[in-house]
Image (spheres, rainbow, N blue to C red):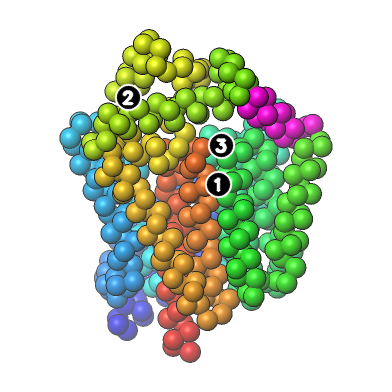
Amino acid sequence: MRACRVPVLSGSRAWTATLPVLFLLSCLVTGFGIGLAGFLFLAIALWHWRASRAVLSRDWPALRPVVLAFAAYAAYALFLHLARATGWHTFDAPLRMLLAVAVVPVLRVAALDARPWWQGACAGALAAAGLAAWERWGAGFERAGGFLNPIVFGNLALVLALVALAGLADPRVRRHWRWVAVAALAGAAASLLSGSRGGWLALPPAFLLLWTQRHHLPRMLPGGLALASVVLVVLAYAVPATGVRERVEVGLSDLNLYLEGNPIPTSLSVRLELWKAAGMLAREHPLAGIDTAAYKAQMRTWIAEGKLSPAVFAPPEPPHLHNDALQALVTRGLPGLACWLAIMLAPLCWFARTLRRAADGVQAAPALAGMLVVVAYAMSGLSEVMFWSMKASLLYAILVFAFMACCLETGRARGRA
């Protein structure tokens, strides 16, 4: 085992430690940050192949359930790609997500713990807030979105805020709680300025998770965080320039119109009609699913027959079904839905088990962060297809494997001590 610990990356440990910081700092404010990080982690792992192989071999019993879940997700995507002769894009994202396992040997050989990830999450949340503020008030955009769809941008800004908060379970990070609190509020502010509403569904389960770990967190954090969030939302609503009041009023108007049976397409009615169509499509193609072009053609037929409202194609035409689970079920069938559930549930169970066994805050923090990432994606996926975005997909996989590596490293360090 010593052969996989001593070589190659030990001399460049400080340089390797900058990768998580730069990655999370740039992930929402550049168009290349996430893709470049995935490439760099993979390139470093391949460059030091012997050490990486030794680490993966040693950690394989622990990594196996999650890696196999991502492998099944990629394998089934490849099968559908070959069976349907679709474009490369249908397999590209699942493959890159699987290759994100390269993060594990890079971090493990360099013996890095989670501290660079806490620093990066704080920096990334602050940068996202800065970009969102400039787009909203400097450039005059109606909704901030950076280099992503505004909904995805807002949801990922909340992910960074939650990851930063998880770091407070680590006593070494807790000393800088003011910096973390400001960064978490900045991430929430970026989400508000994006106009995204679905991602905020993640906050109740996230606060519940944080509450269960309150013995590792600053005493006033759970209550103070809830109060600060309420104050932030109230201020954002009270200041018309933020656009939050307008988005809330639009949402309430959409709900009233739908309940009154008004045929005017709204954000809510479009989603509900899309989900209705998804149920109809799933009943007709339960096993193999149906590709996007084909299901849109079928939906147009149903519209002509009066079985579906024309709202499903209200301009701009929705590119997907606005729900991760339904998108997987319709386009990949029941096996595809099972594969999607696997890449959500396998990491969630892995982090939950690790969190239960954590002896202190240093061990609990990365497991808590991993759980919050999965929960945030799952809740955001109720009203958006997060895995439609290549960047969001790759960010999910990198964060999952990164916090798994951090959990394993803290466990190894504690055992050695």
Task: Name the image quarter holding residue 241.
Answer: top right
- Residue 95 at x, y percent in the picture: 30, 48
Q: What is the span of residues highlighted in magenta in the rendered image?
A: 240-256
Q: Is residue 360 above or below residue 250?
A: below
Query: Helix, strand, or loop for circle 3?
Result: helix
Horizontal placement of 137 versus 159: left or right? right
Q: Amino acid at mark 2?
A: Tyr
Q: Residues within 10 Å of mark 2 (few under 14, many from 20)?
A: some
Q: Which residue is mark 2?
A: 295
Give the farthest residue toward the left: 83
Give the mark nearer the N terminus: 2 vs 1.
1
- Residue 204 at x, y percent in the picture: 62, 53
Give the camera-side residue of 121 and 331. 331
Task: Name the image quarter holding residue 66.
Answer: bottom left
Q: Amino acid at mark 1?
A: Leu
> At 68% across and 56% down in the image, what residue appears?
183
Q: Residues within 10 Å of mark 3 (few under 14, many from 20)?
A: many
Q: CA distance from mark 2 to mark 3?
A: 24 Å
Q: Mark 2 or mark 3, which is nearer to you?
A: 2
Q: Is residue 348 above or below residue 231?
A: below
